[in-house]
Amino acid sequence: FFLSVAAVRAQVTQESFLETTEGTSISINCSHPNIRTGDFMYFYRQLPGQSPELLAMTAKAAKEVRAPKGRMSVSPDRSSSWLRLSEPRRGDAAVYYCALGA
């Protein structure tokens, strides 16, 4: 199945397309080298025909994600973050967004 990925702000970059097989872990990487003090990192998922849903947000610590099962992590310098889906299923095929904000 396929995962589409989109960047929300010009200072944020992501891969535009990722593909994996069911049950094979995958990481969605997000680069934000111009992050400002006070900014949080957010990951959203938009399933077909639905509104975006917030999966996880953090300023710097790692965060567990329940559905889809995974973990959001941030680099020590906060210039990048990633969402690792540990056991993706076909129902997790969606557009994933990374965003920065206060």
Image (cartoon, helix red, strand yellow):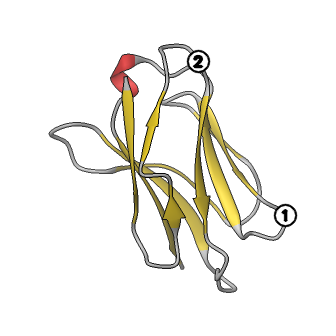
- When the figure is inspected, residue 33 is found, relative to residue 17, above or below; the finding is below
Q: Secondary structure at mark 1?
A: loop
- When the figure is inspected, residue 22 is found, relative to residue 27, above or below; the finding is above
Q: Is residue 2 left or right of residue 69?
A: left
Q: Secondary structure at mark 2?
A: loop
| Residue 8, percent from left and from top | 39, 68
Q: Residues within 10 Å of mark 1 (few under 14, many from 20)?
A: few
Q: Nearer the viewer, mark 1 or mark 2?
A: 2
Point out which mark residue 10 bears. none
Residue at 30%, 51% (x, y): give it.
52
Q: Is residue 85 left or right of residue 89?
A: right
Q: Residues within 10 Å of mark 2 (few under 14, many from 20)?
A: few
- When the figure is inspected, residue 12 is found, relative to residue 5, above or below; the finding is below
| Disc 2 target residue | 24
Alpha-carbon span between mark 1 and mark 2: 26 Å
| Residue 97, percent from left and from top | 42, 55
| Disc 1 target residue | 76
Q: Quadrant of residue 33?
A: bottom right
Earlier in the chain: of badge 1 and badge 2, it is 2
Q: On the rendered image, what quadrant is the C terminus found in?
A: bottom right
Q: On the rendered image, what quadrant is the N terminus found in?
A: top left
Residue at 58%, 58% (x, y): give it.
30
Residue at 64%, 80% (x, y): give it.
35
| Residue 14, percent from left and from top | 51, 58
Dot 1 amino acid type = Pro
| Residue 99, percent from left and from top | 48, 66
Q: Quadrant of residue 32?
A: bottom right
